[in-house]
Image: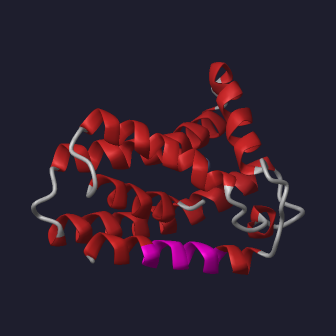
Amino acid sequence: MFLTSHTAAAILIATKIQNPYLGFLLGLLSHFILDMIPHGRESELFDKRADHRQRLIRLAQLGIIDVFFAGCLLVSSLYFLKPVDNIVFFSTVFGAMLPDFLFYITDFLQIKFLFWFSKFHHYIHDFLHIKYAMKYGFLLQAIFVVLCLYLVFN
Ligand SMILES: [Zn+2]
């Protein structure tokens, strides 16, 4: 899933707990659970003829947009959720984002000792072997983000 979706889940978790270590663990766990939910055929995001370098560039472009939306979500939540404990908030968000950062860094820098993690991340993504059009994946994630925000603020 997109970082924006993981961030929305982390914000919801952070509003329900007080312990930063628990926040980190639940954030991490939520990442893998959300990634297991089929969320659209990600191959549609890339040109079929693209080589590894072109795919990385495309990934970076999408990543910048995703980080922008996740950042907006973070900043606005921090603004509107002032009583929330900042350490719990950031440790939960960090736990929820860490797997994707590790995955991208491993892929981009070709860090051999973390290749097992990349394989694990792919395995989780394809766990249910259900593929469908990416437009529905976008819709699913948009609904999920709105639902999380609704639960945070109500
Ligand atoms: Zn992921």
| Image location of residue 45, percent across then percent down | 74, 68
Residue 18 sits above or below residue 10 on the image: above
Residue visible at 59% across and 55% down in the picture: 34
Residue extending farthest to the right is 49
Residue visible at 26% across and 58% down in the picture: 15
Q: Is residue 126 left or right of residue 92?
A: right
Residue 82 is one of the magenta-drawn residues:
no
- Quadrant showing the N terminus: bottom right
| Image location of residue 101, percent across then percent down | 51, 43
Residue visible at 20% across and 64% down in the picture: 78
Residue extending farthest to the top is 113
Q: Quadrant of residue 42?
A: bottom right
- Quadrant showing the C terminus: bottom left
Residue visible at 54% across and 60% down in the picture: 63
Say how many tags the image has.
0
| Image location of residue 143, percent across then percent down | 53, 79
Q: Looking at the magenta stretch, what is its main secondary structure? A: helix
Q: Is residue 21 left or right of residue 27?
A: left
| Image location of residue 138, percent across then percent down | 63, 76
Residue 131 sits above or below residue 90 on the image: below
Q: Is residue 51 left or right of residue 142?
A: right
Colour convention: secondary structure
Magenta segment: 138-147
Residue 20 vs residue 137, the one in the foreground? 20
